[in-house]
Amino acid sequence: MSGWAVVVVGYVVGMLVWASLAVLVWRSRTR
Amino acid sequence: MTGRLSRVGVRRGLGLASCVSMAVLLVMGLMVAPPDALQGQPQRLMYLHVPAAWTAYAAFGVVAFCSLAVLLGGRERMWAVSGAAAELGVAMTALTLVEGSVWGHAAWGVWWAWDPRLVSTAALFLVYVVYLAGRSLAGPVPSARRRVAAWGACSALLVPVVHFSVLWWRTLHQPPTLLAPSLHPPIAPVMLAALLVGVLAFTLTGAWYVVGRTAALLPDATPTPGGLDKLDRRATLDRRGTLDRRATLDGRATPDGRATLDGRATPGRRAATPDRHELRTKR
């Protein structure tokens, strides 16, 4: 993989994990 | 009411701060910080890899603290916080391993090496996966919770082993940058700024997650329509169904199985259908 391809893969994975955590928090809203 | 409003306010504030700081991190890490003179562009993964590892350390510290509190007779909230923090720590350790693997392939030419830092981090991940499995098995039984809490408290001893592994043993991995023994981190100021933004963004995200999930893990959590948690409710029904089917096999079930599967436990049914752990204890 070229340099930027590595960066894109890494940042996409990172943002997916962040989004997963955000969705879990959103779905865990309680009254 | 005020406390409830303030909890919601804290959660929303942390969520907003997490979103903003993560956007700033993307700009800093991908555009502002220059590529490394030796490694080139892949070094930019450091701005995710190191903050993820830091957040995992912090989360496991919270697990240890709350587990000790549970062992000392702490309240339900401590048990819930330790669960949320362990989930966060496992997710962050997994992210650390994946980012490190991608970065390692670019820098070292291999996805994985049997290196002290890598192996100890993988061990840390597995230890806390076991902890989460133990929590799931323990259910509400106090004695089982205490055993799981003891595991959670002791598991934190692995964190310093992971951190100092690069100093204690010969390793491919570079030594610490931010928590280096010297007071002058061996890093350019603009890279240090991006790294600190990453640490801040991940810390805020972790705090947001723990605050949000803790509220849901508490037993008196009431679902919001469309929010929590069709999956959780289904899991509860399934678990009750499983328990009752087991009880049926044990010959101790009530005939009213449908009411059980509907999740409408009555005091009489509950008395006639002992918890799985109680059954095991009685044998």
Image: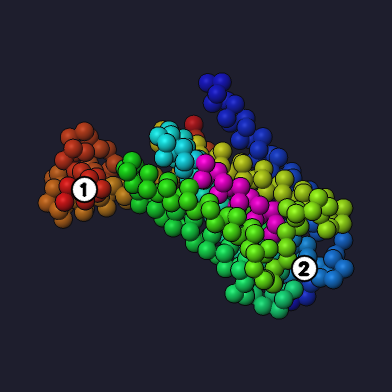
Q: Label 2: few (<14), some or many (≥20) within 10 Å? A: many
Q: What residue is rendered at 56% in x and 38% in y?
A: B211
The residue nearer to you, when weighing B141 against A17, is B141
Chain holding disc 1: B
Placement of B26 over or under B275, stated as above or below: below
In this view, A12 is above or below B40? above
Which of the two marks, 2 or 1, is nearer to us in this view? Answer: 1
Tell me how many marks there are: 2
Residue B224 percent location from the top left of the image = 48, 36
Query: What residue is rendered at 60% in x and 60% in y?
Result: B162
Q: Nearer the viewer, residue B225 or B95?
A: B95
| A28 inside magenta stretch | no
- Determine the residue located farthest toward the front in the rendered image: B168
Residue B193 lies, in percent from the top left, at 82, 50
Label 1 crowd (10 A; few <14 / some 14-19 / many >=20)? few
SS under mark 2: helix
To the question of a shared chain for discs 2 and 1, the answer is yes
Residue B61 lies within the magenta run: yes
Secondary element under disc 1, as helix, strand or loop, is helix
Looking at the rendering, the stretch of residues picked out in magenta corresponds to B49-65
Upstream in the sequence, badge 2 or badge 1? Answer: 2
Q: Residue at x 19, y 43 (%)?
A: B273
Q: At 77% from the left edge and 48% from the top edge, which residue is drawn?
A: B197
Res B23 visible: no
In this picture, residue B44 sits left or right of residue B210: right
Identify which amino acid the numbered label 2 is placed on.
Pro
Question: On the image, which quarter does residue B33 sit in?
Answer: bottom right
Residue that mark 2 sits on = B42
Q: Chain of mark 2?
A: B
Residue underneath mark 1? B281
Asked which colour scheme the image uses, the reply is rainbow
Cα separation, mark 2 vs mark 1, equals: 55 Å
